[in-house]
Amino acid sequence: AAWEREVRRSATPRRDGGMSVLVTGAAGFVGAHCALALRARGDGVLGLDNFNAYYDPALKRARQRLLASRDVVVLGADINDAALLERLFAAVPFTHVLHLAAQAGVRYAMRAPQAYVASNVAGLVGVFEAAARHADPQPAIVWASSSSVYGLNTDAPFSEDHRTDRPASLYAATKKAGEAIAHAYNHIYGLSITGLRFFTVYGPWGRPDMAYFSFAHSIVAGKPITLFRAADGTDVRRDFTYIDDVVQGCLGALDTAGKSTGSKSGKKRGPAPLRVYNLGNTSPVPVTRMVTILEKLLGKKANKRVVTMPSNGDVPFTHANVSHAARDFGYHPTTSLDAGLRQFVQWFLKYYKIDPAKLAKGGKVSASAGKT
Ligand code: NAD
C-alpha cells in the first residue's frame, strides 16, 4: 500500500489536463532529461530503471537523486518483470508510456549479444504486452528506436521511408525488430505506438560510453584517442543531436501520440496510430571536427590516432531528414555542435570536479568520480 501511494503520487499530474507518464530507462541519459522536462511542465512522472552496470551506475544514481529532488520517483525494476509491470498498470492509470529502457551501444553487442535481445526484444514485448493487456485505459506508447536502423543506407539524408533492411550491428537489428513488434501490437491490440529514431544524442548528464564523452575523459587524462576513417578514406560523420532538442521532440511526440489520425468531426475514430519519426539535427559533422571543438573547450590537445574503421557495427555517416517530425509536432532542432558541446564540457568539468585552470596549464589532472 505504501508502494502504491508512492508511485501514484509521483505519477499524478500537477496541472489540469496534465499527462501521467511512465518513463522507462529514467535513470538513463535521455530518460532523466525527459522526466525532468515533463515534471517541469506539470505532468505526472514515474520512472523505472534496472540501474545495470553497462556504464558507471554511480552516474545513474546521481541522475536518480536529481530526479528525486524534483519529486520524481525512479523505481529500481526490470522491464522483463511482467508481474511488476502488471501491478504498476493496475495501480496507476498512465496516459502515456515513454519507453527508453534498452541496451544501448553499438560495439558492446559483439561482447554481450544476449543483453540486447533481453532488453530490446523481450523487454520491449514486456512493455507492449503490459500496456496492451493490463492497462485500462490503454496508454499511448512513445519508444526509442534508433538511426542505426538505416544501417548501410547511403542515400542521405535518411527519411523514414528509406530502406532499413540492412542493419550493420546486432543493436540495430534489435531496434529494427522492435519496429516490427510495434506493428504487430498496433495491429492486434490497437495500441497507439510512436517510434523515435534518435541520431547520436549528446549533452550534459550524457553517456560515458559514447565517443564525445570518452574522448573528453581521454583528453583530460592525456590518453590517446582513436578516430575512425571510413573505408573509402572519408571522415566518419555523425548527425550529432543536442539533448534539449531531443527532449523537445520526445515531448512533442507524446503530445500528439494519443491523438487519432481519424476524422475529427464525428464519433468515428480512425485506427490507433502507428508512427515512426527521425529525431536528428540535420547537419552531419565529421568526428574530427567534434574533437577539435572539445580540444578548444578543454584548452588541451588530444593525442589522436586515426585508423580505418573496423567492421564492428559502426556506420560511416548518419544524416536525418526531420520534415515529418517538423510537420506533425513542430520539431526544429536549434543547437549547434559548438553550443551543445560547450554545455556538455561545463557539466563534465563540474561533475568530475576537474579544475579547468590546471588543465590549461597542461598540469597533471586527476579526475575524481563526481558525487554531486
Ligand atoms: P542509457 O543507457 O543512458 O539509458 C537506458 C537506461 O535503461 C539505463 O539507465 C539502463 O539502466 C536502463 N535499462 C536497460 N535495460 C533495462 C531493463 N531491462 N529494465 C529496466 N531498465 C533498463 O541510454 P540513452 O542514451 O538514454 O538511450 C535511451 C534510449 O534511446 C535507448 O532505447 C537507446 O537505445 C535509444 N537511443 C539512444 C541514442 C543516443 O545517442 N543516446 C541514439 C539512438 C537511440
Image: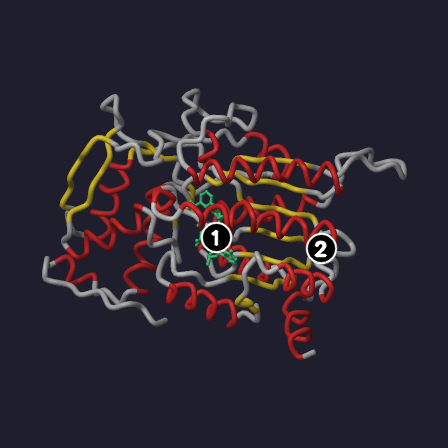
Picture residue at 72% right of the left edge, 49% below the top = 132
Q: Position of residue 171 (x, y in %)?
A: 44, 41
- The part of the image, by quadrant, that contains residue 196 is top right
Give the farthest residue toward the bottom.
2
Quarter holding residue 292: top left
The response on whether ligand 1 sits within 8 Å of label 1 is yes
Do callouts 2 and 1 mark residues in contact (Cβ within 8 Å)? Answer: no
Residue picked out by circle 2? 95
Cβ of mark 2 under 8 Å from ligand 1: the answer is no
- Taking depth in this image into account, of 126 and 272 the one nearest to the observer is 126
**Inter-mark Cα distance, 2 to 1:** 20 Å
Above or below, 30 relative to 45: above
Q: Amino acid at mark 1?
A: Val
Q: Look at 57% across and 71% down and name the residue there.
A: 71
- Judge the density around disc 1: few (<14), some (14-19), many (≥20) Cα neighbours within 10 Å: many
Query: Disc 1 on helix, strand or loop?
Result: helix
- Tag 1 residue: 30
Q: Amino acid at mark 2?
A: Thr
Q: Is residue 177 above or below residue 358?
A: above
Relative to residue 129, is residue 288 depicted above or below?
above
Q: Is residue 200 left or right of residue 121?
A: left
Q: Residue furthest front?
A: 114
